[in-house]
Amino acid sequence: MTQRGSTAARAVRLALVAGVAAAVIVGCSPGSPTRSESNGRPPAASPSPTAQTSDPAPTTGEGRVVTSVLFNNPWSGRRSEQFRLQNREVRAIDGAPKGSSIYIATYSLSSGEVGDALVAAYRRGVTVRLNIDPHADFIETKRMLRVLGTDQDRDSYVVRCHLACASDVTYPRRDGSGLVKPYQHAKFLAISESGSERYLVMFPSENLSPSAIEQSNDMIVLGGSRAIYDFVVERFEIMRQDAGSAEGEVTSGSATLTMYPVTLGPGARPSPESDPYRELFSNITCRVDGKRTILRIAMSMWSLPRLYLAHRVAELSKEGCRILVIGQPEIAQGGWDPEIKAALTVAGSTVELRQTTGGKWVHSKIVTVDGWDARGDRLFLAWTNSANFLLQGLYYNDEIGILTTDAAAIRTYNRHIDGILSRHSHLVAR
């Protein structure tokens, strides 16, 4: 057992060098298992709602891991496009046979369609276990509590940790209006069997709520990997104890999963040095043989404690990288802190900073790099997270991130971001 789970940024380099042909689980929480197990150019500016990945990728005994990347479209008038991700999740739940298991972690559960599917699954003999943040008592959450109960000695139940499962740390808001509180913000759906699929795990940026009608979200689907499925189930088992961080990491094929928060040692304080995004942004070369590295960031929230990330992004633009950033920099409440916008648009910066239009907003947390690392080696990756660029997102919340070096998936993320930039955004005034 290592002192703590390695950061996903270090996993990037390992994935690029080795092709990642092994699955390794690392955890440091009490009761957390340690396991080593062998596994089986700039794109067009048009959104891609779904990509079935088909490009060559590292293969293992468990087969192809990244099976699809999906996006909803809140700018569409069609409900099927607005709720594309939830519809896929409902189909997966409906496909779970008697004797199979479903594990879900989510910040909110207020979707009637998802609630109906879960109740039906439970009644046909599927084990259903839910971990729902306690911030609100929606009707569907109350129904899950009534139908499944909270007795963790039973097969099926609902868990609601006090604040976050990993932490109860609070700290004052900068405006003195109260306390910032941690929360259970990891989002995953793991099903042991669904139709012809086994060990199916989905990671949406969205919550299980009707908010999809106004939010742009993504979901990466990983299937066929027992290592990834076991990792997610084991994280669930640690989280449900409400007794500390489930931090850990697993790599299988071209995908690396990292569970947060980062564990701070006795007396340690949050530091930029422990931020995996800082490590990633520090490992970028902007120009190689006349070609430019392209960094894309789609981020729902970005706050002052991680201002150093904005400074580094602006530095990269000055060094010649092309930087495309979209989020809510013009919305004070529920968006970005104003210092982030100021840092990205500082004199000399060429960051292309954009805001969504049409009353919709980006709820995804996506970072992609298409270029070169500090040594001049090819760096091509996509990193999607449940965590925003917030202090609690790194140190106190329950969060999960998925990094992939799957070429088709990365290109799909890039097309998606470019499509929003070209069709549903405007430049932020400097």
Image (tube, rainbow, N blue to C red):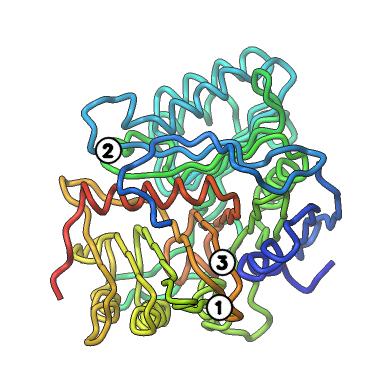
- Residue at mark 1 to residue at mark 3: CA–CA distance: 9 Å
Tell me the SS state at disc 1: loop
Label 1 belongs to which residue? 283
Q: Residues within 10 Å of mark 1 (few under 14, many from 20)?
A: some
Which residue sits at x=33%, y=33%? 210
- Residue at mark 2 to residue at mark 1: CA–CA distance: 34 Å
Q: Residues within 10 Å of mark 3 (few under 14, many from 20)?
A: many
Label 3 belongs to which residue? 379
Please determine whether, in this image, residue 430 is positioned above or below residue 217. Answer: below
Label 2 belongs to which residue? 74
Query: Relative to 187, is 429 on the left or the right?
Result: left
Residue 341 visible in the displayed image? yes
Tell me where residue 69 appears, x and y as whole percent: 50, 40
Select label 3 or label 2 by which is in front: 3
Is label 1 in contact with label 3 (beta carbons under 8 Å)?
Answer: yes
Which residue sits at x=65%, y=18%? 195
Query: Relative to 82, is 391 on the left or the right?
Result: right
